[in-house]
């Protein structure tokens, strides 16, 4: 998939933060962007802004924890556009508490969004991509998949799991001409961190657009090349040595 013009790209969690930046960058590259988010106002706003700038974008109602809804989304995208070229598994959540304080419901919810969601979306998209003999799934991982810090056990478990899932998908999909990439991101200036940690120095984080540009880079490699994993870090964040 050397170019992105006319490609149909579905971005989960596209309503804000990194997902919105990925929508922006891919739409700018000519893709038809499906802004899939659980929050209606956010997805509508991102899609409307892109469209007002002359880009191709549609809001899509999606909760990645709901398999019935997700199945309907993927089916209706293929019915409408005849294809699904790119799936970006970006939606993610966290809760900053110790294992003692983490409820079983919160554990289940974090795993459902961050790990089961990408599995579900990949499982639904892959048959269409395999049939087409092309396609690309990008999983947004985190430095939380490479090491651990306190008060994020479920997040770590989900992201270490997602990194493993991404490599497993890569191995299964590659013989069918389908690419899978794990983008391991370091801290970004998005509501995910800024809303929860108001004292954080934004200067130690990176612009989500830098990670979005990396997504564009992996998506635009020559057909004969795949990047299974790439890491993108801010220069000053301390969570990565
Ligand atoms: P964010 O909280 O700013 O945005 C997440 C988006 O996902 C929101 O629009 C939200 O509505 C949506 N979402 C949440 N649950 C959903 C669901 N069930 N179905 C569909 N959409 C859902 O977060 P962000 O910082 O933009 O993070 C995006 C991804 O990047 C996440 O996977 C996160 O783990 C990862 N990441 C973030 C950072 C960081 O520092 N911000 C660092 C590394 C990796």
Image: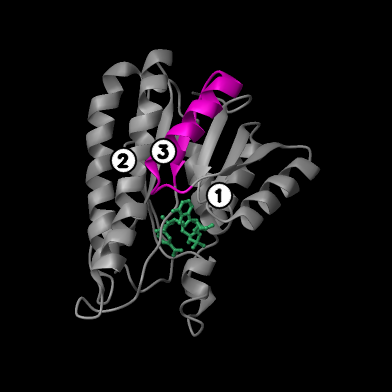
Q: Residue at x 50, y 34 (%)?
A: 73
Q: Is the residue marked 2 within 8 Å of ligand 1, measured from its CB?
A: no
x%, y% of residue 195? 52, 75
Q: In front here: 113 or 167?
A: 113
Query: Does the magenta portion include 65?
Result: yes
x%, y% of residue 171? 23, 29
- The residue labelled by disc 3 is 68
Q: CA distance from mark 3 to mark 2?
A: 14 Å
Quarter of the rendering containing residue 167: top left
Query: Does the magenta portion include 86?
Result: yes
> Is residue 222 visible in this depiction of the protein?
yes
Q: Residue at x 59, y 22 (%)?
A: 81
In this picture, which residue range is highlighted in magenta?
A: 63-89
52 sits to left or right of 146: right
x%, y% of residue 31? 62, 31
Which of the two labelled residues, at mark 3 and mark 2, occupies the earlier sequence position?
3
Q: Residue furthest bottom?
A: 199
- The residue labelled by disc 2 is 119
- Local crowd at mark 1 within 10 Å, few (<14), some, or many (≥20)? many
- Secondary structure found at label 1: loop
Callout 1–callout 2 Cβ contact below 8 Å? no
Q: Residue furthest front?
A: 68
Rendered image: mark on residue 14? 1
- Secondary structure found at label 2: helix
Q: Residue furthest left?
A: 100
Q: Is the residue marked 3 within 8 Å of ligand 1, measured from its CB?
A: no
Which of the two labelled residues, at mark 1 and mark 2, occupies the earlier sequence position?
1
Q: Residue at x 49, y 38 (%)?
A: 217
């Amino acid at each position: 998939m050397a170019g992105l013009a006319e490609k149909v790209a579905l971005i989960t969690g596209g309503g804000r933060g990194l997902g919105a930046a990925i929508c922006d960058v891919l739409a700018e590259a000519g893709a038809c962007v499906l802004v899939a988010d659980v929050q209606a106002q956010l997805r509508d706003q991102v899609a409307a802004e892109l469209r007002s700038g002359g880009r191709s974008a549609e809001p899509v109602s999606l909760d990645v924890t709901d398999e019935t809804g997700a199945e309907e989304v993927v089916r209706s995208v293929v019915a409408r556009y005849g294809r699904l070229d790119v799936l970006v598994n970006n939606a993610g959540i966290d809760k900053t508490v110790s294992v003692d304080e983490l409820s079983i419901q919160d554990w289940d919810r974090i795993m459902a969004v961050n790990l089961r969601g990408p599995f579900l979306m990949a499982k639904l998209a892959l048959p269409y991509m395999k049939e087409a003999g092309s396609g690309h799934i990008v999983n947004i991982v985190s430095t939380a998949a490479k090491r651990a810090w306190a008060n994020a056990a479920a997040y770590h478990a989900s992201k270490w799991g997602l990194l493993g899932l991404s490599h497993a998908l890569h191995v299964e999909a590659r013989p069918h001409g389908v690419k899978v990439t794990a983008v391991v991101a370091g801290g970004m200036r998005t509501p995910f961190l800024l809303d929860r940690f108001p004292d954080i120095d934004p200067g130690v984080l990176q612009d989500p657009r830098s990670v979005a540009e990396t997504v564009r880079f992996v998506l635009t490699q020559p057909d004969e090349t795949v990047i299974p994993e790439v890491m993108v870090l801010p220069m000053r964040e301390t969570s990565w040595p």
